[in-house]
Amino acid sequence: MARLTEDDKARNEAAIRAAMEQILSGNLPPAGKADLKTLASLAGVTRTGFYTKKNRDGTPRPGAYQHLAEEFERRVRQLRDAGEIVDPRVAQIERLKSHNTELKERVTKRDEEIAELTAFRTLAVSRLAAQHAEIERLRKQIADGSNVRSLPAPAGGIVPFGSCS
């Protein structure tokens, strides 16, 4: 692989810095996020320049753009710590999590309301059944001719002496 000239390296660093500013301002490409892969893609460089290399004798040496990768990761971390989320997908995940929590609370509240209404309905139906049974018992008592007498109905549906209220 060919070595980078100083001009190529300077152009690449400028492109990386421009891509870094674009990402940190929240202007991400589709399906991109605030990471080194997107940074390398936007800058038009390979990701390998961001990572530590090994010499032939096994000793580590910094990648050509490792200092920029460290600066980028530091700035992303600072923005996240400050509450300015760079990655819109992370913001969307946070928004969906809070919406999910809200929906769970609403479902719990509705479940409680449904339980209360079910208990009320059960009580109302049982009271209606008891009232119906009492009415049926009284009707049967009248029909059997016991000592319960029916009052005569007013003639023409008019109350003779006025209202009782």
Image (tube, rainbow, N blue to C red):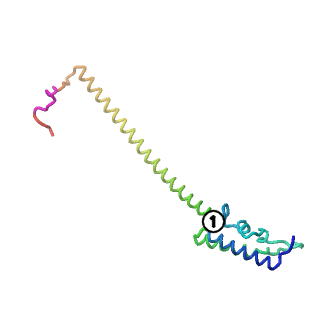
Q: Is residue 123 left or right of 161 when viewed as pictured?
A: right
Quadrant of residue 43 in the image? bottom right
Q: Measured along the vertical axis of the image, is residue 142 above or below residue 114?
A: above
Can you identify the residue that label 1 sits on? Answer: 87
92 left or right, relative to 135? right
**What is the quadrant of the N terminus in the image?**
bottom right
Up the image or down, 76 lies above or below 161; here it is: below
Picture coordinates of residue 40 (x, y %)?
Answer: 74, 68
Q: Residue placed at 65% from the left, 71% from the top?
A: 22
Asked which quadrant contains residue 55, the reply is bottom right
Taking the magenta stretch, the answer to whether it contains residue 37 is no
Which residue reaches farthest left? 161
- State which region is magenta: 152-160
- The 10 Å Cα crowd at callout 1, few under 14, some 14 to 19, many 20 or more, is many
Nearer to the camera, 81 or 41: 41
Q: Position of residue 143 (x, y in %)?
A: 25, 21
The three-letter code of the residue at mark 1 reads Asp
Q: Answer with left or right where residue 83 lies relative to residue 145.
A: right
Residue located farthest toward the top when viewing the structure as drawn: 144
* Position of residue 46 measured from the top left corner of the image (x, y, whole percent): 78, 68
The quadrant in which residue 141 appears is: top left
Residue 66 coordinates in the image, percent (x, y): 76, 74
User: Is residue 135 placed above or below 54 in the rendered structure?
Assistant: above
Task: Give the residue at x 39% y 39%.
Answer: 121
Indicate yes or no whether the magenta region holds residue 158: yes
Residue at the farthest right position:
57
Image height check: is 30 above or below 43? above
